[in-house]
Image (cartoon, helix red, strand yellow):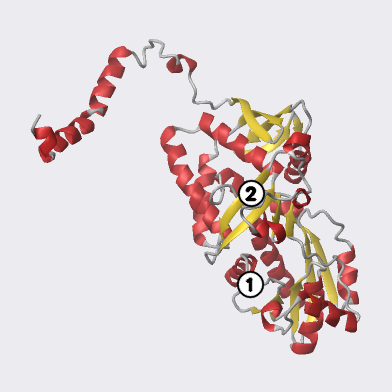
Amino acid sequence: MSKVVLAYTGSLATALCIHWLKTSKNLRVVTFSANLGQDVDLEPLGEHAIENGAEAAHVVDLRDRLVDEFVFPGLRAGAVYESGYLLANAFTRPLIAQELVRIAREEGCAYVAHGCTGRGNDQHRVEAAITSLEPRLGIIQPLLEWSFKSKDEQIRFAESFGIRPLKPVEDRYTVDVCTWGRGVAGGPLEDPWAAPPSDAFAWTRAAERAPARGVEVEIEFEGGTPVAVDGDRMDGWCLVEHLNELGGLHGVGRIDLMENRVVGIKSREVYEAPAATILTGAHQALEDLTLGKALIHYKRSVAERYAQCVYDGMWFTRLRRALDAFCETTQECVTGTVRVRLYRGTATITGRRSPFSLYDAGLARRRMTDSYGDSSAKGFFDVWRISQRQEARQRRHDDPVDRSR
């Protein structure tokens, strides 16, 4: 009798998956649950999975790995998808897939199963990562195969077999949480004209309810990685959690987006990402101080491609590794401190300093120096304008209006 490892959250759907995999697929079921910084106690998940029919359950704390191995490389790359998605849930999927594959090997499973619906990005991301890591594993998609037509039908079936979800059945929103951000979709948010209701938010205060006096924080980076806040060195996960709490208090990190999913469907998503918002802005400010013009401009195009890789589930590909290798070399001098003011929904850069700063106050003030004087400037701009002169001459030759003058 073959075995399957199921990604398990304790929801109604994943609780039903255990029963369905055993009865419809004749499989022995083990479960895997990940602690990624959710807002709930995950310890009961293992016992709950066993009660619902699993023969073994794995609950793994992945918070440190998520931040150190996925989030911070993305931060160093400057990865932001489209008009502002900071990739919170997208970073978790390859890590979840990696653990599913590890447990499948450890438990001797022939299959992996998940509770993705197929309407969003998760199924593609998880399955692409599994295939990259272990293409011989079979992938089962219960929610796309079973015959349930509605949530009420699932509830009635679960009650008839004594299957109970650990998480309450929630119809108003679809919520996904990790330490890098909280994503909310569905319900009233499906109307792109409607303002997000107050109950869509859990981490951040509304700007008008934030403290009347803001606060300034100083964030230290070493090689592009944040290592300390206000002089206190912290592990990555603790640093992110600290800034989530502080930023949320001041209303920082609310993001409302129209997002293009992997398959091209548009989706309205609301995110809360206080730490991600603060750190992304601070990191960019330090890069602006320490990287040269050509590198900054080129890296922005790399950042966009990196974000696309993460969003599209291409983490375990040579392309992402190659982009990472480039980005790592750009961070050698991205060391220093950035000061950020948090005030009623805003995170404003108010200062930056670095031992590797490329800023020269004398040059910026146009002060005469040995290296760059007025005669040098005149020669440079004379040469710079050569191509413009040539184009102007060409336009006069081609344009009858110009020739008549």
Q: Is residue 161 visible?
A: no
Residue 201 seen in the figure? yes
The answer to whether residue 311 is left or right of residue 150 is: left
Q: Nearer the viewer, residue 170 or 73?
A: 170
The structure residue drawn at horizontal position 53% and vertical position 58%, both measured from the top left corner, is 309
Image location (x, y in percent) of residue 159: 89, 80
Residue in the image at 90% along x and 64% along y? 44
Measured in 3D between alpha carbons, the distance from the residue under mark 2 to the one under mark 1, in whole angstroms, is 23 Å
Could you tell whether 363 is left or right of 28 in the image? left
User: Tag 2's secondary structure?
Assistant: strand
Q: Residue 96: x, y in percent? A: 70, 64
Residue 281's place in the image compared with 369, above or below, is below
267 in relation to 104, above or below? above
Circle 1 sits in a helix, a strand or a loop, which is it? loop
Q: Nearer the viewer, residue 192 or 241?
A: 192
Instruction: Residue lying at the far top in this picture: please name it.
Output: 368
Please provide percent x and percent y for residue 238. 78, 43
Instruction: Please name the amino acid that badge 1 sits on.
Output: Gly
Which one is nearer the viewer's eye here, 104 or 347? 347
Task: Find disc 2 in the rendering and name its residue.
Answer: 256
Residue drawn at x 64%, y 34% as measured from the top left: 221
Above or below: residue 326 compared with residue 291: below
Q: Dots 2 and 1: beta carbons under 8 Å?
A: no
